[in-house]
Image: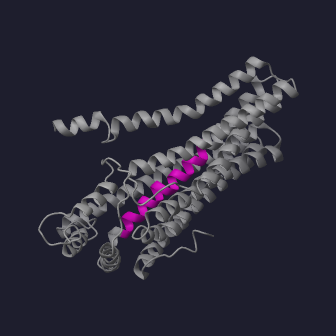
Amino acid sequence: SELLVQDMGVHRVKNLGDVINKGVDCYLFRSVPITMVIMTTIAGFVFFVSDIRFTLAMLAGSATCMCCINMGINMNFEGGTRLTHAMNYDLTGSIALAVRAGAIGGLSAHSMSLMGMVSTWIIFKEANALVGFGVGVSIIAFYTRIAGGIFAKGCDIGSDFVSAMLGEDVDDYNMDSMDALKQAHNIHDIDGDGEEDSAHGERKQVVDPNAYMDEAEVGFITHEEAVLRTKIEKQMEETLTTMHPVNYLDAIGENIADIGGTSSDLLETMCVTLSTAVILGAKAHEVPYFGTSLPFNIIATGTVGCSVVSYYVWCHEKHSSNRIRRSLQLNLFIVVVFVQCVVFVSCYLQYKVYHTISFSRMTNYCLITALGLIAPEACAAICEYFTSVNYPPVSWIAKEA
């Protein structure tokens, strides 16, 4: 509800979002019936080699994945135009809006996976049905990622062909006019001496992702810049009237592949992880109810923690992109600690109160969970070190180029 009450900006920007949304709905309207026919055919073959419970669970998984895709795409459109308008005025508010809009789609995938797997287990009362649910999700996720990717690439290639025929870059979005509008106001040289003002240089360094963050208080927004932002938004409105139709098609393809594909992939990952962990816990653990419930406890706790931290992002107008990213990483670290604490309490109760596991087993569970929580962040840190301009590998290549 907080997302929907935000200002959507100028009328033509809102219309752009509506046009792209209708294009995606048209794609889904034409592709969903074909997907349903394919899934029904597959379910018919599966019924002869398996049982009815596996088949029904597979159909339920495919339907859940379709709902997750639709949820992620709709939230992207609801937040996209509002975020475009907010970024012209308030950095703190726009980042908070972006995080919350993205969290709706991501946390919806988490919640739907938990709801689907738990409901399937309660209704069918066997682990084999969980595999069927995961198979249905995987089939739809595979189709969405591959078919959406092909559609997006076709749109991109079509945009390149149109640019070649027209002799101009249709993806430019009239950025030259935006730059000319900025230069006409001479925001960097208010005193007119032909050199950049020191105050403007300080503000520019604050928003430069590669600049050192100075804690000294500097003015970021001036009256001239506020007026310029209003004019830029008006220029955006005029630019939309001259956009080539292929731009809309390109945006439709990107949303289908990036938003719909990512939502389905996340749901597939959660379902496959849960089904695998539950089956292993039931078959290999001497206390089956604990081995099967622990994966649900971990994922449910992470979902609750992410929901809480998405409501607050520590950010200020003078913060650089690195500083903002560290704030987001701090939120994630809080979730990691929260999940680890819940796992420790759960294992400790089984060891001390219910006497179902030994001390060594409790220690192993806590250690394995900690490694699982830390490993993705360690991989992300390594990738950032070797790909970011703020670290020696990439900066060395840039200097030697």
Tell me, yes or no, whether the highlighted magenta stretch contains residue 173. no
**Image quarter (top left, top right, bottom left or bottom right) of the N terminus:** bottom right
Q: Is residue 97 visible?
A: yes
Q: Nearer the viewer, residue 340 or 361?
A: 340
| Quadrant of residue 179 within the rendered picture | bottom left
Residue drawn at x 61%, y 39% as measured from the top left: 336
Query: Relative to 41, does residue 250 appear above or below in the rendering?
Result: below
Q: Is residue 49 visible?
A: no
Q: Is residue 323 left or right of residue 188?
A: right
> Image check: 338 left or right of 144?
right
Residue at point 40% right, 47% down? Answer: 322
Q: Is residue 82 above or below residue 339?
A: below
Q: Quadrant of residue 32?
A: bottom right
Q: Is residue 195 left or right of residue 392?
A: left
Q: Is residue 13 left or right of residue 106?
A: left
Colour basis = one colour
Position of residue 26 measured from the top left corner of the image (x, y, whole percent): 50, 69
Q: Provide residue 63's location: percent of width, then percent of height.
A: 66, 56
Of the pair 37 and 221, the residue shown nearer to us: 221
Give the quadrant of the C terminus.
top left
- Along the line of sight, which residue is nearer the eye, 59 or 287? 287
Q: Residue at x 29, y 78 (%)?
A: 242
What secondary structure do most residues of the magenta stretch adopt?
A: helix
In the rendered image, the residue lying farthest to the left is 194
Magenta extent: 248-269
The residue closer to the viewer here, 45 or 65, is: 65
Q: Position of residue 206 (x, y in %)?
A: 33, 55
Q: Position of residue 107 (x, y in %)?
A: 62, 53
